[in-house]
Amino acid sequence: MSLYNKIINEAIYAFQDEKILNIISEITGIKGLEADKKLYAGGLSIMERGDFLNPHIDNSHNIKREKYRRLNILYYVTPNWCIENGGNFELWDAEVKHQKTIVSKFNRIVLMETTQDSWHSVSKVLTTLPRYCVSNYYFSKNSPNKNNNKYFHVTSFTGRPEENFKRVYGSVDNYFRNKISIILKAGRGKKLINEKK
């Protein structure tokens, strides 16, 4: 599969179509959803042998911090993918103690709510085949918390249940990065947004 596959690239923006937004809004009950035309942390991702993502929560806002990140839609596009290949999506409970694996199989769509405790990860890729995934985020002006309570956090990582050091280090690292980001109003990846849309 080519990184520049026309159909794959068209799929990235197809998920931003107003008809799709309306369907997703109807399914989730979330009103006022907006697509991210600049693809801040979205687009096509590739994971190769040995790549993985530890449990993490995505940052809470869009790049200007004026809207809450509400949903992440993942569309897996590598043919013939199976659980034995690794590189599978994992959802965790709020304490990051128990997870559920969702195989990143071809043509599967996963729609995930992004909140302060929507911990998720990707298991290590065990095959020489690259795993491709199209992702888009949806935003709204309203907080996902009950009573519309406001909050802010950066992308925050932790360790898996057996990784005690990573869990402690992650807590400290997340705390300081969050404080610095709030004080300096700084963010990562601002140069990586898509200016064409």
Image (cartoon, grey):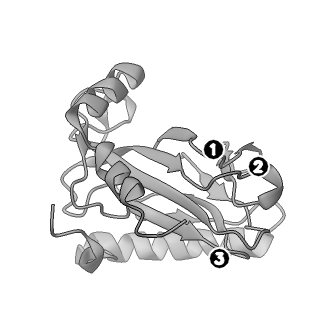
Amino acid type at image mark 3: Tyr
14 shown above or below 176: above
The residue at 62%/46% (across/down) is 106
Amino acid type at image mark 2: Lys
22 shown above or below 66: above
Q: Are marks 1 and 3 in contact (CB under 8 Å)?
A: no
Q: Earlier in the sequence, mark 1 or mark 3?
A: 1
Amino acid type at image mark 1: Ala
Whether residue 144 sits left or right of residue 197 in the image: it is: right
Which residue corresponds to mark 2? 97
Whether residue 104 sits left or right of residue 3 in the image: it is: right
The residue at 68%/49% (across/down) is 90
For disc 3, the neighbor class at 10 Å (few under 14, some 14 to 19, many from 20) is some
Q: Could you say which disc has been placed on residue 169 in the image? A: 3
Q: Can residue 154 be seen here?
A: yes
- Residue 101 lies, in percent from the top left, at 73, 45
Quote the CA–CA distance across marks 1 and 2.
8 Å
Q: Secondary structure at mark 2?
A: loop
For disc 2, the neighbor class at 10 Å (few under 14, some 14 to 19, many from 20) is few
Quote the CA–CA distance across marks 3 and 2.
17 Å
21 shown above or below 162: above
Q: Could you say which disc has been placed on residue 161 in the image? A: none
35 shown above or below 161: above
Query: Which quarter of the rendering shows the N terminus?
Result: bottom right
Quote the CA–CA distance across marks 1 and 3.
18 Å
- Quadrant housing residue 86: bottom right
For disc 1, the neighbor class at 10 Å (few under 14, some 14 to 19, many from 20) is few
Which residue corresponds to mark 1? 94
Q: Which residue in the rendered view is the most extreme toward the left? A: 196
